[in-house]
Amino acid sequence: MTLLPSLILCVSLFQVGYSKQYLPPSTGPCNVQITPAELVDLSRVDPFSPDHSKRAIMASSFVPVNCSDESQYSPYVSQKVAAVMDQMLPLVGISFPNVTSKNFMIETKSNGSHPSLPGKEYPVIIFSPGMGASRFIYSSLMQSVASMGFVVISVDHPYDSAIVEFPDGKSINSLGVKKLRENILTALDTRAKDLSFTLDQLEETPKLIPSSFTGRLQLDKVSVIGHSFGGAAAADVMINDTRFAGGMNLDGALWGSVLQQGLDRPFINFGEGKFLHILNKTWSETWPHLRGFRREFKLNGSYHMTFSDLPLLVENAPISLEAKKNATAAVGNVSGLRVRTILSDYIAAASTYFTTGKKSPLLDRSSAEYPEVVIVR
């Protein structure tokens, strides 16, 4: 599945710049430091690069830091990324006539980098966004998960992501859905290699994390999470990289060898309220081949773009009730803050199980706290 139309739907929500819009802070016990970094894989030629350059990606780390320190707000996205979002979001039916995407602000911690829990080895989650999306439209969700004590790394995949902006000012736009789908297995393999390479970087040269975290990350058992095509990448990378102890797919059709080969480690599918045919087909095809712990959830009242920050952006944008109502066709009718809370808790529960073997009741039975979540099987 692709996010380009959904992003465009939301863009019309972002047309005229007004005051700053502060997104709700995370609710976990820790503040979160957000750091972007460029990572260059010198061992690999980018299959989509017209000049056959080495594969370079951008990633953001979300690191839990000293809970006693004060936090501050920084821009949700850069001006260049905002400009692309502002062109795309209206295509999926979202209209922000009184605010541009660059006006949103996210809580972050930029001064100080001391681990919150001395002596603790921190679990790591690596996240892959949907096709045609940007890692930035998941930042509040990733921040929320990190505030619970996880180190989260969110990866952008150049030529696939809507736009990837590098520190030198260079940017790479998506090739577009048609081109990517014509090369779907190459795109999938490239994503999987991006995720493994990101994990390599955490082991070798941790540019993404504060120096005080060096040697304190649990890198032999890592969780991998993805939305849409990112969920397919999460499954694909687990086939050959055993450092990934478990994965979660957020509303994505599965592709590639996992359909028949399956997985021998835990894998969870989490879908929208009314599954699309392609989800039913690929999830059902893969289900018998999932040999580790397996679970399938659905979130009632959700749609494909519910599994991002877009519901939260719509909820906090200074727009009319009618505009917010119209946006539900893209983001669902579960409130943005509620969505973030639900997804954060289920991602945290899954990742804790993947890395420690400790299973939360959320993974095995219906929850009175989250009646919107249904265990399908």
Image (cartoon, grey):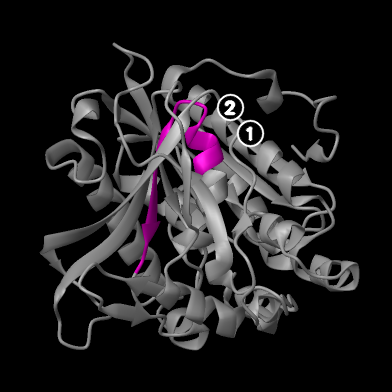
Q: Which residue sits at x=51%, y=52%?
A: 139
Report x, y in % for residue 163: 41, 75
Report x, y in % for residue 33: 38, 39
Q: Which residue sits at x=82%, y=65%?
A: 328
Report x, y in % for residue 334: 82, 51
* Proximity of marks 2 and 1: CB atoms separated by less than 8 Å: yes
In the displayed structure image, the side of residue 231 where residue 314 appears, left or right = right
Report x, y in % for residue 207: 19, 46
Quarter-of-image position of residue 342: top right
In the displayed structure image, the side of residue 93 where residue 266 appears, left or right = left
Tell me the amino acid under the disc marked 1: Tyr
Query: Can you see residue 265?
Result: no
Where, quadrant-wise, is the N terminus in this rendering? Answer: bottom right
* Residue that numbered label 2 is attached to: 349
Query: Can you see residue 193?
Result: yes
* Residue that numbered label 1 is attached to: 346
Q: Which residue sits at x=28%, y=57%?
A: 193
Whether residue 258 is situated above or below residue 125 in the rendered picture: below
Is 54 in front, or is 19? 19
Judged from the image, the secondary structure of the residue bearing numbered disc 2 is: helix
In the displayed structure image, the side of residue 279 where residue 80 appears, left or right = left
Quarter-of-image position of residue 126: top left
Where, quadrant-wise, is the C terminus in this rendering? Answer: top right
Judged from the image, the secondary structure of the residue bearing numbered disc 1 is: helix
Q: Which residue lies furthest to the left in this view?
A: 42
Q: Distance between the residues labelled 2 and 1?
A: 5 Å
In the displayed structure image, the side of residue 41 where residue 324 appears, left or right = right
Whether residue 40 is situated above or below residue 358 in the rendered picture: below
The magenta segment is 143-157
